[in-house]
Image (spheres, rainbow, N blue to C red):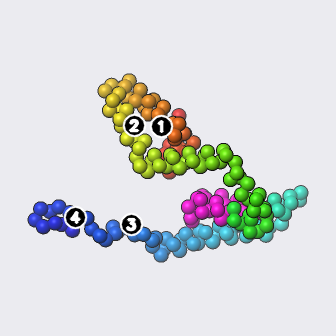
């Protein structure tokens, strides 16, 4: 929309094309088919008789684990939702007790990693990491050596809050050497 003779555009109340709140029916159907294929994989693996020497509960846990990993890779739903489906499947199927299925959440190391992911995601979403890097580049980047010092200073400031492991796992990010 244009605003009179000035030709300036004004904000529109309509959602931009392709940016609506819900996915298209074709995308929903594709996600459903992918999810059902993951569930079918789990059922097929579940029904295969376990090899000699492997307990049936261990084989069933492997079926749920493989289906969870395939679900995380194929992404019919976000990773957290797929992981919760896997945890729920282990408890509801009787493969593990509820306390066994949830025992990993009692480990403080797991929560440290989860919090590091949250903080690093916040740095990336808000652009705070980039803004801090730009400040160091502006202050130290007059010459090539200053740029390298700025890069080191940025890493020194940001690495306690955003280590290399969480940033490598985020989409569009490469590992630091």
User: What residue do we see at 86% from left, 58% from top?
Assistant: 54
- From mark 2 to mark 1, how far is it between C-alphas? 9 Å
State the residue lying farthest toward the right.
53
Q: Is residue 92 left or right of residue 127?
A: right
Kindly state the secondary structure of the residue where label 4 is placed: loop
The image quarter containing residue 10 is bottom left
Residue 37 appears in which quarter of the rendering?
A: bottom right
Instruction: Give the residue at mark 3.
Output: 19
Q: CA distance from mark 1 to mark 4?
A: 38 Å
Q: Which residues are magenta?
A: 59-86
Q: Secondary structure at mark 2?
A: helix
Gap in angstroms between the C-alphas marked 4 and 3: 18 Å
Label 1–label 4 contact, CB within 8 A: no
Instruction: Look at mark 4 in the image and give the residue it sits on.
Output: 10
User: For the residue labelled by badge 3, is the local secondary structure a helix, a strand or a loop?
Assistant: loop
Gap in Å between the C-alphas at discs 3 and 2? Answer: 31 Å
Q: CA distance from mark 3 to mark 1?
A: 32 Å
CA gap, disc 4 and disc 2: 33 Å
Which quadrant holds the N terminus?
bottom left
For label 2, count other residues whose C-alpha is less than 10 Å away and answer few (under 14), some (14-19) or many (20+).
many
Displayed quadrant of residue 38: bottom right
Residue, disc 1:
158
Residue 85 placement, left or right of 78: right
Q: Is residue 172 in view from this perspective? A: no
**x then y, percent, for residue 59:** 80, 61
- SS label for mark 1: helix
- Residue holding disc 2: 133
- Mark 3 or 2, nearer chain start: 3
Label whose residue precedes the other's in the sequence (4 or 2): 4
* Disc nearest the viewer among 3 and 2: 2
Q: Does 10 appear in magenta?
A: no
Q: Are marks 4 and 3 in contact (CB under 8 Å)?
A: no
């Amino acid at each position: 929309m244009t605003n009179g003779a000035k030709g300036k555009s004004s904000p529109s109340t309509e959602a931009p094309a392709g940016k609506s709140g819900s996915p298209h029916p074709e995308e929903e159907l594709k996600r459903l088919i992918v999810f059902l294929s993951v569930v079918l994989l789990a059922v097929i693996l579940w029904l295969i008789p376990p090899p000699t020497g492997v307990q049936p509960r261990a084989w069933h846990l492997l079926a749920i684990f493989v289906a969870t990993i395939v679900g995380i890779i194929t992404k019919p739903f976000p990773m957290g939702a797929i992981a919760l489906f896997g945890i729920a499947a282990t408890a509801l199927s009787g493969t593990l007790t509820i306390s066994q299925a949830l025992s990993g959440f009692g480990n403080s190391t797991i929560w440290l990693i989860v919090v590091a992911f949250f903080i690093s995601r916040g740095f990336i979403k808000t652009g705070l990491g980039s803004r801090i890097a730009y400040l160091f580049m502006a202050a130290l980047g007059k010459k090539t050596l200053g740029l390298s010092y700025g890069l080191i200073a940025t890493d020194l400031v940001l690495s306690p809050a955003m280590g290399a492991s969480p940033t490598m796992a985020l989409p569009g990010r490469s590992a630091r050497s």
